[in-house]
Amino acid sequence: MLKVKDTVRSTVNLTFDGRVIKVFHGTDADKRFDNEVRILRHLEDRGCDFVPRVLEADRDKLRLVSTNCGRRVEHIDATRVREVFAELEKFGVRHDDPEDRNITYRSSDGRFCIIDFELATLLEEEPPNPSV
């Protein structure tokens, strides 16, 4: 197993068989875990093919196992970053951390993918904007 992230909010490991294991910790870990699982399942239900798929979700351990969406992107221009995250919104999700660190590249089909949905928002659940 290869540790790819170890912060106050989560630890992420890649297994040699292609799974990603993310363990949530720190402030609001249970809420962030619940949100990421909910968002990923929503996206899978809508046929979004450029995000991880949930393989296992253990709420007691705050452990999420998902598919791997490729390797981290080292170079991507700001316009392309905006385009990738805008495409996600067509599936009813706003990422809320639209940075290049949350984009991977899947070489099997040449696709940019999006990861790390713990802060994402389902657009259909947003409260209405009273100023509109």
Image (cartoon, rainbow, N blue to C red):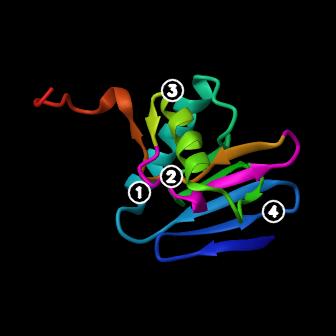
In percent of width and height, residue 125 lies at 31, 30
- Residue under the point 68% across and 40% down: 53
* Disc 1 and disc 2 in contact, CB within 8 angstroms: yes
What's the residue type where badge 1 is placed? Asp
Q: Dots 3 and 2: beta carbons under 8 Å? A: no
> Do the numbered discs 4 and 2 sit on residues whose CB atoms are within 8 Å?
no
Residue at the image point whose x is 56% and y is 48% from the top: 79
Task: Give the amino acid at mark 2.
Answer: Arg
Which badge, 4 or 1, is on the more N-terminal residue?
4
Residue under circle 1?
A: 30
Looking at the picture, how far across and down is residue 8, in whole percent? 47, 76
Badge 3 vs badge 1, beta-carbon distance below 8 Å: no
Q: What element carries label 1?
A: helix
Query: Disc 3 or disc 2, which is closer to the eye?
Result: 3
How far apart marks 3 and 4 lie (CA) works out to 31 Å
Badge 3 is on which residue? 90
* Disc 3 element: loop
Q: Closer to the observer: label 4 or label 2?
A: 4
Question: Which residues lie in the magenta part?
Answer: 95-109
